[in-house]
Image (spheres, helix red, strand yellow):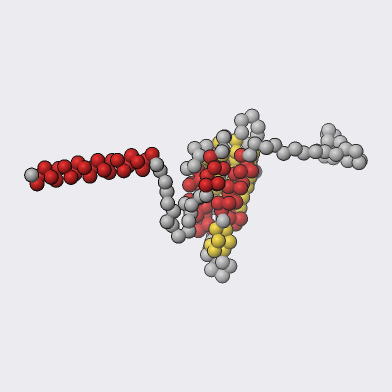
Amino acid sequence: LNWLNVGLMCFFMGAVLVGVNLIAHSRYARIDMTTDKVWEISDQSRQILRRAKYDLEIYLNAIGDSEARSPPEAWRRTQLLLFEMASQNPRIKVIPIDPRNNSHAAVAALFSTPQPNSIYFVYRTPGDKPLSRVMAITDLYASNPATGEVAQFFAESRIVTTIAQLISDRKLKIYATTEHKEPPPQKGDRMGL
């Protein structure tokens, strides 16, 4: 009877674990219990990230000044945040820039020389040339000048705003005035547009 009792308890415990895993798989949720709240993304940010219809590549150029004390911590938080953002939409890819692979050439084709401590956003719409933005890592945090410690980290709002600008469907219109002795836009030399 003891062995039967142990066998039944093991069977029921296994069934409970399998059931909990199935429920957790279908009703996935993550609670951010970290001190710096890196994993916490607002619902509005999640909606914006899910709206990307085409491929969005985010290139990270983490090479920078070795004497600066805050960029390594800022880069760590930024990379964790970007990988969490990429998990919201399969079209978003986070790619570290490395001269040994194709990522360096892809960024160099759009931005000439990749600048240190920069993040490059490239949104590839079909038919049009890629839309792009550049952001410095120093735009994402405020540090304590005495210790170099990251005092405030506000990367989510700035990164999501940049992504929202890239993926928005609205087209900007540029108007050219030609009635007050302005050079005509069709002029072929440097005086034209």
- Position of the C terminus, as image quadrant, is top right
The x, y position of residue 63, in whole percent, is: 55, 53
Q: Residue at x 61, y 47 (%)?
A: 161
> Where's residue 137, x and y in %?
58, 54
When the figure is inspected, residue 161 is found, relative to residue 138, above or below; the finding is above
Residue drawn at (55%, 61%) of the image: 152
Q: In this view, does 130 lie to the left or right of 41?
A: right
Residue occupying image coordinates x 56% and y 53%: 155
Picture layout, residue 76 above or below residue 90: below
Extreme-left residue of the structure: 1
Residue sitting farthest toward the bottom: 146
Residue nearest the viewer, comparing 39 with 107: 39
Horizontal side of 100 relative to 174 (left or right) equals left
Q: Where residue 73 sits in the image (x, y, percent)?
A: 50, 58
Q: Quadrant of residue 190?
A: top right
Residue 7 % position (x, y):
15, 42
Q: Residue at x 22, y 44 (%)?
A: 13
Q: Is residue 157 visible?
A: yes
